[in-house]
Image (spheres, rainbow, N blue to C red):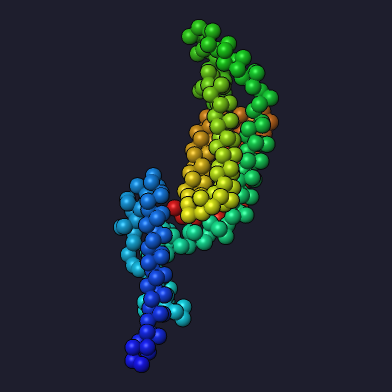
Amino acid sequence: AGTRRGDKAEPGRDRARDSDEERLGRARAREKAMVFLDVLVNYGCRRWLHKEDYSFDEGGDKTRSSSRPSQYPLLGFKDRHLEDDYLEYLVVASRARIILGYVTVILLYGLGPFLLYWPYYKESIWLQDLYRTWSDEQKEDFKEDQQKGIWSKYFPTSSSTMYALFCIVLLMFILGLVAVVCMYQMKRFEKHRTWIFYFTPAMYLLYMAYEGFRFAYSNQSYNDFFGPASWVFVLIFQYAAPLASLFFISLPTL
């Protein structure tokens, strides 16, 4: 009889032990799959950031004395396994918002900065080819005649490169949307959906770096229309407009 009573007391512990083992198993599976990201995050910072093993008993109360799991100011939970579980939940709960954010940024960029410059494509390419035929003296005179804050003053032969980058940026967001939809729909990516929180911020970071560089050399392009303060309108309605899509996307601190 004593043996039977002891057997009844064990299932709760066994379930807790099994849940911990399953959690560790999922974490190990992710560590094997996330090759590139783990080199930067898991093996570089993860072991250093992991400071506690937070767990719950059967009644939902913690086995630790503190009221809640401890966290870093910006880097999430000190229990990195708990942080992984949180990100897995967050990426599923944010599905509609993330897809809506991608659709919004594609529309804002495609109908804004991307579409804005295409009517001047032939003129820009013609000016680029003409500039290459001029002598050094003519080139210097052309640059001096251009006002500051105009792209052609600093990069008069980069029109074809600029238009190629316009297409690459738009293609980057389109491929990002396709990747997100595939990762949500295909079961083979079910364990890797948290990757969305890695490549999505990377895309926005690349976009901001690219547009920041362009803005630094073309912030006075609309002085003829809006005067010396035209850079404010250029920044809001052209360069920063696609960033309005971030209102729909819930991105954790990475």
Q: Residue at x 32, y 50 (%)?
A: 44
Can you say which quadrant of the picture contains the N terminus? bottom left
Query: Which residue, as the protein is rendered here, is positioned at the far left?
Result: 48
Relative to residue 55, is residue 226 depicted above or below? above
Q: Residue at x 40, y 85 (%)?
A: 8
Relative to residue 149, is residue 59 depicted above or below? below
Q: Quadrant of residue 177?
A: top right
> Looking at the image, which is closer to me, 58 or 70?
58
Q: Residue at x 68, y 36 (%)?
A: 111
> Looking at the image, which is closer to me, 112 or 79?
79
> Looking at the image, which is closer to me, 141 or 24?
24
Q: Quadrant of residue 228?
A: top right
Q: How many numbered marks have been drawn onto this rendered protein structure?
A: 0
Query: Which residue, as the protein is rendered here, is positioned at the far bottom?
Result: 1
Residue 166 in picture, x, y percent from top left: 58, 31
> Looking at the image, which is closer to me, 30 or 97?
30
Residue 252 in picture, x, y percent from top left: 49, 56
Q: Is residue 190 visible?
A: yes
Q: Is residue 66 visible?
A: no
- Left-right relation of 86 to 181: left
Residue 84 in picture, x, y percent from top left: 44, 60
Q: Residue at x 60, y 15 (%)?
A: 127
Residue 180 in picture, x, y percent from top left: 56, 47
- Left-right relation of 161 to 67: right
- Left-right relation of 113 to 55: right
